Amino acid sequence: MKSKEPLYLRLPFYYGWLVFLVTLLTYAFMFGLRYSVTVFFVPLQKEFGWTSAMTAGSVTAFFWIYGVAALFLDRLYRSLGVRKIVFLGGILLGVGGILCSFASELWHLYASWGILAAVGSSILYTVPTMVLGRFFEKHRGKAVGWSSIGVSIGQAALVPFAAWIIANFGWRPAYITLSSLVMAGVAVPGYFIFRENPESLGLKKDGGNLTREEEERTSQVQRTEGWKTSDALRNRSLILILLSYFFLVGTTISMLTFVVPHIIRLGVDPLLASTAMGVIGFMSAIGSFMFGLVSDWMGRKYTIAMLSTGIATAMFVSTVIPPDMIALYAWVTLYGLTYGGAPEQYAAIVTDYFGARKDIGLFGYVMFAGAMGGGLFPLIGGYLSDMTGSYYASLTYLGVGMVCSMITILLAKPPKPPESSS
């Protein structure tokens, strides 16, 4: 299994951290473009007379297609390999954004962003996340957790940049510029850097070169071990992981939807209230770093449970928080820290429990469960808000949802794999 890769891929440092950097860069561009979409809504509504519900519908379509596409990524990945599928994801997301710049009818927006960009984004989250975990074992929690810092970087850099381009040149050039950056910053480095696993480069997990005996043993393991997808989907532990992620994503997506309106209703100035989102983004980057370390020490399951408890606490506290800026920033600090460390740890626990052989396919189901929660929970929370005239019932409901996330992940025990899989 001697590596035939070019010299630049056999540098004298641990290659996994190069994969980490490209994954972080992928997250920064992908999520930066995704979060920037909201700043396009006002100019679109002004130019075409579309309502908020009409433009927001493209985000709903994006989210559902994003989740459904994840179910088919394993088959696509096995046909194309990691390099080509990441390249395809970057092209789809970038082309979807560029086509938005030509929109003149509402269905143009839905087709370009809600379908093309959604499929590309699904690829760019699932595949790099799982491939990154294959390069690490002892440091898997750090690598996967720290890579999500790219989300905060993209949010902090590209959203203001998009707003500046729109203000100075218009929304169409802004779509083209950001989408072109995504293709250049994601598709190209992903194609040249990503590989299936460290063994394909003659490397060990967590660094070092494979000996001849290790190469032979690794080759034998890759041929004979691993889970069948059908077996894993019937396994109690994976079902519990799916349920936990369903509750976590549903709750956190809803929280990002309701938090600013709730703070404004308390009497806080809207401009100050909007800064809460920036603080959440900043603190989530710190949380990703902190709990990446904790995860490798404590284990993925207990780290997720601890973070879920912290998020649930933040949800319940939000129902009694006064209209005071000190209290507000203390609250968003707690929420940002715990929110930032949680989602990527699910990718790590899937690899821990079920191995790398079927990890992309299995994490696709995890993502699908999260997308279902992300689509359902805001609807229920919005209904409760309309019924009660405030967000207190909605926030309490979200707190209960996070408690369910914590309980289900604690019940997920490391599974005993079948004797043989293919």
Image (tube, grey):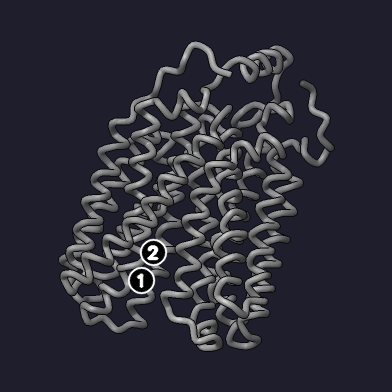
Instruction: Give 121 or 310, whichever is nearer the viewer.
Output: 121
Counting labels gives 2
In x, y percent, where is residue 130? 56, 39
- At 38% from the left edge and 39% from the top edge, which residue is drawn? 242
Depicted 332 relative to depicted 148: above or below: below
In the structure shown, which secondary structural element does the residue marked by tag 2 occupy?
A: helix
Residue 409, visible in the rendered structure = yes
Asked if residue 365 lies left or right of residue 358, the reply is: left
Depicted 194 relative to depicted 61: above or below: above
Instruction: Give 303 or 180, whichever is nearer the viewer.
Output: 180
Instruction: Give 87 or 145, whichever is nearer the viewer.
Output: 87
Q: Identify the residue under disc 1.
A: 276
Q: Residues within 10 Å of mark 2 (few under 14, many from 20)?
A: many
Asked if residue 310 lies left or right of residue 278, the reply is: left
In the structure shown, which secondary structural element does the residue marked by tag 1 occupy?
A: helix
In x, y percent, where is residue 337? 36, 55
In which quadrant of the rendered image does the C terminus lie? Answer: top right
Q: Which label number is shown at residue 408?
A: none
Q: Identify the residue under disc 2.
A: 280
The image quarter in which residue 15 lies? top right
The image quarter in which residue 275 lies? bottom left
Residues at badges 2 and 1 in contact (C-beta under 8 Å)?
Answer: yes
Depicted 409 relative to depicted 112: above or below: above
Depicted 390 relative to depicted 13: above or below: below
Residue 32, visible in the rendered structure = no
Looking at the rendered structure, the kind of residue marked 1 is Ala
Asked if residue 14 lies left or right of residue 328, the reply is: right
Looking at the rendered structure, the kind of residue marked 2 is Ile
Instruction: Give 64 or 395, whichever is nearer the viewer.
Output: 64
- At 31% from the left edge and 57% from the top edge, which residue is drawn? 377
